[in-house]
Every structure is written in structure tokens, then in C-alpha cells.
Amino acid sequence: MDYKTVMVSLALDRPNGACLAVAGDLAERFGARVIGIAASDVKPPLYFADGDYAQKLLDDEATAVRGRLSELEAEFRTAVEKRTKSVEWRSGQTLPVPYVLQQARTADVLVVGARSETIVDPCAAADPGDLVMQAGRPLIVVPPAVEWFDFRSVLVAWKDVREARRAVFDALPILAAAKDVTIVEIAEQGTRRADALSHVADVASWLHGHGIVASTFVPESAAEIPEQLDRIAADVGAGPVVAGAYGHSRLREWILGGVTRHLASESGRCAFLSR
């Protein structure tokens, strides 16, 4: 199994070079086509206005949005056209999250930039948290400092739940391309370390059936799980971290769990997230 179509979501309010580089790396590695996507809705005036003047403000904003989307298309094509046999651009004057969610049906994997803000401008970019919980496609979240997608070493952050099983299955092409794969489970409260060791051994055996050799590791302590994942990733020289995306719905809004939120917004490595 390979990825045949990579979709990269571009933001209007910050550089997109890291996302474009990762999308290009994936396209070259898997012979995939790349779809660039961006959207922004018109923001209403922040101060009182009505009549013709209000309409002029809205028209000017719409013109600015169309101009920015055109700039992003040019940036996208310049970055990836020489790295893949097929490119496509999709954009709309609408809110980014629902637009990307709708278009995700055309992709095998989505690439999006990490956002460290508590609240992301809904008119400027798609929030990775919203995408990973609703897209039905795996998401690669790219920190701004990442220059390429490192296939040499991959860390699998295992937890014995559905989301982790889905993530490892969705990541099979990347795991098969890696030189080194490490499966780690940090035994949380209520989970015996012996059980965690059994879990990661089973995952390693399953991967072996797919021709992927993986090592396993279960640390002694479960304290500060996000920080431990970062330390382990550094120790094994991991590029991306593969993990299930965990969260729950509160008043129809998705709230990410602590580890997922860390990987999607605070980690210095690419995160491959699925649920």
C-alpha cells in the first residue's frame, strides 16, 4: 500500500514552506500526486458600517482574499510541480475547516502546519485539531522549523486503543519506508508494565508480517507522557511520531487529549495522527 494522493493545506496568515517541503517529499517517495488546498472567508468589518460603505469594505476584503489565494496557488505550484507528475489546486472563499473536510475525500493523507495558538483564526487556516478529529483521513502535522520528512527513523507511540490501531495501519507506507521503527508504550496509571510489554511485542509481530522490523520499548515511569515521548524520540533519532488522535466531544466541539494536543501543536517533529 502506498499513498497515491497527498493533500497539503496552506494557511493565509503564515509561511507554508515546511508543509510544502513535506508534501513534496511524500510525493517523491510514493509517486503520489499532490493537491494544494486553501480557503478563507470574508471577515465582516470590526466597526459599525452600513450601506454602500459597508459593501465596499466587504468587496475590498473579498478582493484581498482572492489575491492571497492566487499567491498561494503560485507558491504551491512552484514548490511541488517538479517533485510530482500531477498537481491540482483547489481553493474557495469560505471557511477553511469545512472546505478542507469536504475535499478530504480526494486524498489518502493530509499535510497541515502545526498551530501553537489556543485559538486559530477560522478565516485564515484550518486548525489541525479540527481536521484530525473529523476528516476521516490521517494527518501529518508539520512544525514550522521542519525542512523535510525524515523517513530514516519513526517512533510509534502506542496505546492499546482503537485510535492507535488505526494510526499504525494508516502509517504502514511510512513505516515500510523507514530504516528504523521503534514502538513505545508508556504504561499509564492502571496499566501494568508487563501488559504494556506484551502490547508492543504484539504490534511488532504484526508489523513483521508486513515485512517491517521494529524494536520495542516500555519505560519504567509513566510521568509526564508528552515529555517522555519527546525524550524517547530524540534518543532514537526519530523523524515523525505516529500516534492515535485521542479526544472527546464537548457541546459538539472536539477537545484534544494532552498527548494529541502536544503532538499537534508543541512538538518539534512531524506528527502522523489518525483516529
Image (cartoon, grey):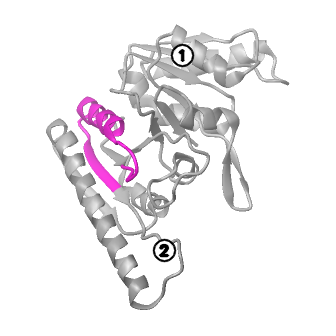
Badge 2 amino acid: Pro
Which mark is on residue 44? 2
Where 215 sits versus 203, above or below? above
Q: Is residue 74 above or below residue 164?
A: below
In reply to whether residue 20 is colored magenta, the answer given is yes
Question: Quadrant of residue 89 in the image?
Answer: bottom left
Q: Is residue 1 left or right of residue 45?
A: left
Q: Tell me if residue 1 comes above or below residue 210 in the rendering.
A: below
Q: Amino acid at mark 1?
A: Ala
- 190 or 116: nearer the eye? 116
**Location of the N terminus (image quadrant):** top left
Q: Earlier in the sequence, mark 1 or mark 2?
A: 2
Residue at (43% x, 58% y) in the render:
100
- Disc ID at residue 233: 1
Relative to 60, 51 lies left or right:
right
Q: Position of residue 268 (x, y in %)?
A: 49, 26
- Work out whether 7 lies above or below 190: below
Instruction: Give the magenta part as a residue range.
Output: 10-37
The reply, left or right, for residue 220 in relation to residue 50 is right
Camera-nearest label, 1 or 2: 2
Residue 40: image location, x then y, percent: 40, 63
Instruction: Give the x, y percent position of residue 88.
Output: 23, 54
* Secondary structure found at label 1: helix
Give the camera-side residue of 210 and 227: 227
